[in-house]
Image (cartoon, rainbow, N blue to C red):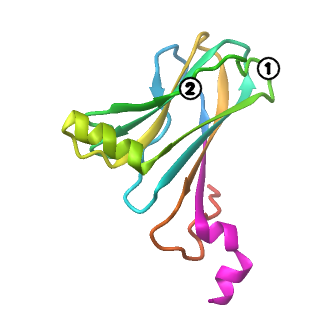
Amino acid sequence: MASGLTANKLQSEIKITQYDFDPDSTESTAVGWVDMRDFSKFLVGFFRTVGTSNITLLIKAATSAAGANAQTIVTKTISAQPNAVGDYVFLECLAEQIAQVAATSGYALRYVSAYISFATNTDEGVVTYVQGGPRFAYDGLTADYVS
């Protein structure tokens, strides 16, 4: 095993990205489209940073990174809403679920995004994506992002 994979074991087995989610809307909004071609698992985490309204959370898959032909894969039934700063919830899907919806819809679905809506348009959160089961593990799969 390469020395980088020893030092960054988890970072070579999962890909993590985070998004500041502030849509200024109550419409269901895509957080960010990511390519699932080389992954078998997808997990979304939502962390409340501003506001107290209810949310809806679902995962959609599409045929392009622009969200073309988006189809719902799974929806979170939230019995206890993350309605206080610091609350968080998770939702996940597998590549097999995406393939099932693709077969039913007739679209070649490859990209996924969380869709979130707030009941109040001033609410905000941080969304974390974890893509797992990579086809190829390599150092730097999860990388720092500093702008």
Tag 1: amino acid:
Ala
Tag 2: amino acid:
Lys
Tell me if residue 102 comes above or below residue 84 in the rendering: below
> Where are the magenta residues, as a range?
1-19
Q: Nearer the viewer, residue 77 or 110?
A: 77
Residue 24 seen from this side: yes
Q: Nearer the viewer, residue 32 or 93?
A: 93
The residue positioned 45% from the left and 39% from the top of the image is 113
Number of numbered discs visible in the structure rendering: 2
Q: Which secondary structure, mark 2?
A: loop
Name the residue carrying label 2: 76
Q: Which secondary structure, mark 1?
A: loop
- Of labels 1 and 2, the one closer to you: 2
Name the residue carrying label 1: 84
Answer left or right for 112 relative to 13: left
Tell me if residue 38 comes above or below residue 64 in the rendering: below
Asked if the stretch drawn in magenta spans residue 6, the answer is yes
Disc 2 crowd rating (10 Å Cα; few below 14, some 14-19, many 20+) is some
Q: Position of residue 47 (x, y in %)?
A: 71, 33
Residue 66 seen from this side: no
Asked if the stretch drawn in magenta spans residue 64, the answer is no
The residue positioned 74% from the left and 17% from the top of the image is 83
Answer left or right for 118 relative to 113: right
The residue positioned 46% from the left and 16% from the top of the image is 27
